[in-house]
Amino acid sequence: MSDSIHPLATAAPSTPAPDDGGQVGLRPPLGALSPFGAHPARFPVHRRPVLYLDFDGVLHHEEVYWAPKRGVYMKEPGHALFEWMPLLEAALGAHPEVGIVLSTSWVRAKGYNYALRRLSEPLQRRVVGATFHRRWHESTEFQSAARGLQVWSDVLRRQPAGWVALDDDDFGWPAWCRDQLVRTEGALGLSEPRVQDELAAALGRLSEDARRLRSGA
């Protein structure tokens, strides 16, 4: 495969999210379903909040490519793979109850274990799964869905106590959960102060919600 192709990026989605007329919040309009048809058996309910984590344009610059002899590499001069990962470790440090679900296209392109091992040990210990699973999803079907629908489908199955997504892809997010996306700029990722502030606020809300659930409030 030519290294002029960006195989780790999701192709332009052909399945945009339905619009609910501007409604926001966790609950979708009545009848909103997974874009992948009938749900498989649900995950065990995780009574912990989770962060849906993209890699490209979040933990490093978006210009990530693959070549047969080089493998996955950073094409943008002056940048390195996972250069901003310490910023995520720092952001999560005060929130030990928050898990991670991998929403990155690296899982589909390179496999779950490969993607998981690219993370630092502290972040690996937080990972509870991924949005893509070969047993449930045809790769082409999953790839054609907007990132927001991939995440929402996982939320419906996993039923976390709360969630937020960290991603540079904001195309086609369902209107009812768009406010749970912390959007990054592909060239800046987590290095942007605005993103750091928004993520800190979102993680704070998740932790507070989790405490209320534990206390029964």
Image (cartoon, rainbow, N blue to C red):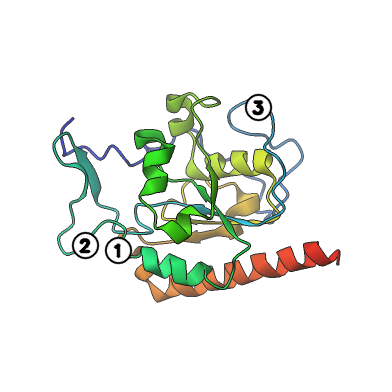
| N-term-proximal mark, 3 vs 1 | 3
Residue 102 lies, in percent from the top left, at 48, 47
Using the image, determine if residue 171 lies above or below residue 143: below
Residue 217 lies, in percent from the top left, at 86, 67
Residue topped by disc 3: 40
Q: Nearer the viewer, residue 138 or 85?
A: 85
Using the image, determine if residue 96 lies above or below residue 102: below
Crowding near the residue tagged with mark 3, few <14, some 14–19, many ≥20 C-alpha atoms within 10 Å = few
The dot on residue 79 is: 2
Residue 135 lies, in percent from the top left, at 53, 24
Q: Are marks 2 and 1 in contact (CB under 8 Å)?
A: yes
- Which residue is at a point 60% across and 60% down the rendered structure image? 98
Q: CA distance from mark 2 to mark 1?
A: 7 Å
Q: Are marks 3 and 1 in contact (CB under 8 Å)?
A: no
| Left or right for 119, reference 126 | left
Residue 215 lies, in percent from the top left, at 83, 67
| Left or right for 157, reference 137 | right
- Which residue is at a point 14% across and 60% down the rendered structure image? 77
| N-term-proximal mark, 2 vs 3 | 3
Q: Amino acid at mark 3?
A: Pro
Crowding near the residue tagged with mark 1, few <14, some 14–19, many ≥20 C-alpha atoms within 10 Å = some
Residue topped by disc 1: 83
Using the image, determine if residue 31 lies above or below residue 94: above
Q: CA distance from mark 3 to mark 1?
A: 36 Å
Q: Amino acid at mark 1?
A: Glu
- Which residue is at a point 69% across and 34% down the rendered structure image? 42
